[in-house]
Image (spheres, rainbow, N blue to C red):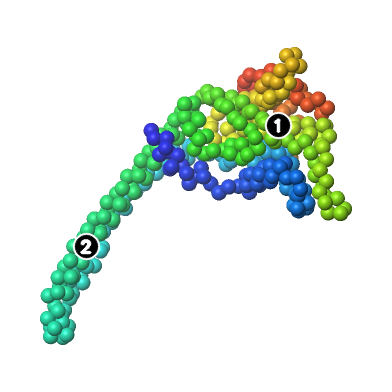
Amino acid sequence: MSWKGAMRSFSATARRIERDQQRRARLAAQEYKQLQKQQAVENATQAVQAYNDYIEVIKSVHQDCSDQIDWAAMMHEPPPVLTRLSNANELSAQAALNNYQPSLFDRLLKRGPAKIQRLEEAVVVAHHRDQQLARENQEEYNRLLIEWQDRQDLTREVLAKNSDVYANVFEIFSPFENINYLGAHLEFTFTSDHIEVDVQVNTSEVIPDFAVTQLANGKLSRKSLPISKFNEFYQDYVCGCLLRVAREVQAHLPVSQVVVHALVDQLNPATGQVENQVIVSAAIPRAILRKLNFNALDPSDSMQNFNHTMKFTKTAGFQAVERVGLAAPLPINKKR
């Protein structure tokens, strides 16, 4: 199987038009980074709007998600059909030759033989043109057939839950791009029916430690954010990222469960060293995830729906926690 071929052939689906929310997230992250660097802001109103947009993005990262991929439907995609081309150019040129009748001036000036020769040459050129079009048509069909076969091969492996191809699916569809704009780096561990994800959160680049407002005189006011407000944004963003990752994984792959861990570099009070620590860990089954209303829920409160570990206060922020394992399967309701 050619993964590059599969990537090209899936491109129409994978490189879909950027969603409004994805575009908003990308632009908001860019504007926020500019706001961090600027010493003097010319347009205070625009700066405040950019800041508020960014805050909204980091609090709602869980709300957007790719469309569910219907792998079963892809398996029934028909192969391409070879269109048989006619020798239309040659037939047209031959008809012009056959129907040629020398005009009076052609006969008087003896131009008939030369015109007949040009018409005969045009038949040869048209014949070669038809052959070239036929070759190009065959080559295009061969390309489409190979790409169709690549899609079929990949789809068959996904439906068989071959975890060796899961990384290729993410490479093709790139579902986590706008999370990367917000400073989250992902590391995956694949098994056939569940995926474990380490979400590395870069707090210093993502969560603002300041707030901006526009004063009555039109100037921009920038103040340090209270620690409780900072931690509130921080918690919503981290939990929102875990939800988003779980949603994207289950939209792209037929796994029943995603186990996600948020990690951050922070001080370990036991060693006095800055260490990469797990701060939230959750086992998120598909059966529970699909019941949630992501436009209405609070990301941090939603962790109560899952087997999870999290120690958090608004004054102290996150503390290190243990990783959770897989959640137990839901009980089957038997009819009596």
Q: CA separation, marks 1 and 2? A: 68 Å
In this rendering, position of residue 5 left or right of residue 84: right
Q: Amino acid at mark 2?
A: Val
Q: Residue at x 81, y 35 (%)?
A: 229
Dividing the picture into quadrants, the one containing residue 112 is bottom left
Tell me: residue 33, above or below residue 278.
below
Q: Tell me if mark 1 has few (under 14), some (14-19) or many (20+) residues whose alpha carbon lies within 10 angstroms of its own.
A: some
Disc 2 target residue: 125
Dividing the picture into quadrants, the one containing residue 155 is top left
Of 287 and 17, the residue lying toward us: 17
Disc 1 target residue: 203
Dividing the picture into quadrants, the one containing residue 277 is top right
Tell which residue pokes out farthest to the top in this image.
270
x and y, in percent, of residue 101 in the image: 16, 79
Of 132 and 34, the residue lying toward us: 34
Of badges 1 and 2, nearer the viewer stands: 1
Q: Amino acid at mark 1?
A: Thr
In this rendering, position of residue 22 left or right of residue 83: right
For residue 328, say whether it is visible. no
